[in-house]
Amino acid sequence: MTSIAVIGPGAVGGTVAAWLAQNPAHAVTVCVRTPFERLAVETPEGPITASPHVATSPAGLSPVDWVLVATKTYDTDATMAWLAALVGPETRVAILRNGVEHAAPFAGKVAAGNLVPAVVDIPAERSAPGRVLQRRNGWMKVPAGEAGEAFAALFAHTPIQLEVVDDFVTEAWKKLALNCAGAVNALTLKPAVVAHDEGAAEVMRALVRECVAVGRAEGADLSDDLPDAVIDGYRASAPDGVNSLHADRAAGRPMELDARNGVIVRKGAAHGIATPANAMIVALLNAAAS
Ligand SMILES: NC(=O)c1ccc[n+]([C@@H]2O[C@H](COP(=O)([O-])OP(=O)(O)OC[C@H]3O[C@@H](n4cnc5c(N)ncnc54)[C@H](OP(=O)(O)O)[C@@H]3O)[C@@H](O)[C@H]2O)c1
């Protein structure tokens, strides 16, 4: 039996926890802030349900084989109390988050060889605690190596595609290029369809061009046509698709603005690269939320 704890079973965490629980060799615990009875996920393959152990507090929990962190980046501090209970010397910890700074907050708390950063492309939306719409089967990419391979094996029974990659830095920045453009959805409070507006699309391209420049300075191998490819991707996606930054702003929650756009400004400044478009959208979204 493989013991797996998912911290933060929201859109992504709820989807992966439900899929992991379909394997009877997995003992799944979900670590929640808002409790629920069971997980119900509308997947592209049809509805799936799961009744994992639901933990509302770290008290009484002991180290597991795998911890999957799927809380938002702004909930990192609250995540640490769970980790203290769940992580032993052998525990592997996967970070299922957006951004390019997956491992940094956990360095020193988890042995480097046991940390698995994951680029996640599983579009999912939560309608209520424990209830999720998974729009595509999606994929996750993790760094090559023993821990990455073991993480991928956890999902062998699912339709979610797992890939171990040699150049994780590039994959993380490619995903950030997509995510940074999503700030336009959050600002306009319009779903993916807004990318069909040429003015909005040009702002998205400007955000991505800065991401490409900074990502290259960080060692990512990013192509010149990435800004146009990002717009093409938005235009080809479900017009009513809502990204998580947009969903957070619409719900009045904090936003992962620093992880998705602020990081481009911060790292750009460190490399002497101007990032006025990202700086502007960070300022406007912060002002709108204050
Ligand atoms: N959604 C997507 O389509 C998508 C796709 C790719 C990547 N991502 C990334 O995946 C990560 C997770 O995003 P998400 O959309 O899944 O977020 P989400 O739906 O907001 O889920 C986050 C979950 O964390 C829970 N949580 C917060 N603090 C907690 C704590 N102290 N203890 C236990 N649980 C806690 C929340 O509980 P409550 O129920 O109380 O709010 C919620 O269930 C983000 O980095 C996001 O950018 C998302």
Image (cartoon, rainbow, N blue to C red):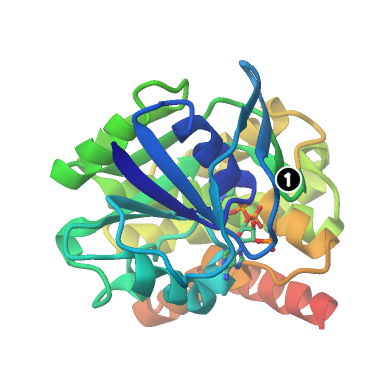
Residue 216 coordinates in the image, percent (x, y):
34, 57
Residue position for label 1: 126
Query: Could you tell me how many numbered marks the image carries?
Result: 1
Residue 64 coordinates in the image, percent (x, y):
31, 55
Res 262 seen here: no
Mark 1 crowd level (few <14, some 14–19, many ≥20, 10 Å Cα): some
Q: Indicate whether 179 appears above or below 107.
A: above
Residue name at image x 47 percent, y 43 percent: 120
Q: Indicate whether 120 appears above or below 42.
A: below
Residue name at image x 54 percent, y 69 percent: 57
Q: Nearer the viewer, residue 5 or 211?
A: 5
Quadrant where the image shows the C terminus: bottom right
Mark 1 residue type: Arg
Residue 114 coordinates in the image, percent (x, y):
20, 57
Q: Indicate whether 128 appears above or below 45.
A: below
Q: Nearer the viewer, residue 278 or 156?
A: 156
Q: Is residue 38 left or right of residue 218?
A: right
The response on whether ligand 1 sits within 8 Å of label 1 is yes
Q: Where ligand 1 lies, by quadrant?
A: bottom right
Residue 217 coordinates in the image, percent (x, y):
32, 64
Which residue, as the protein is rendered here, is positioned at the far top?
A: 45
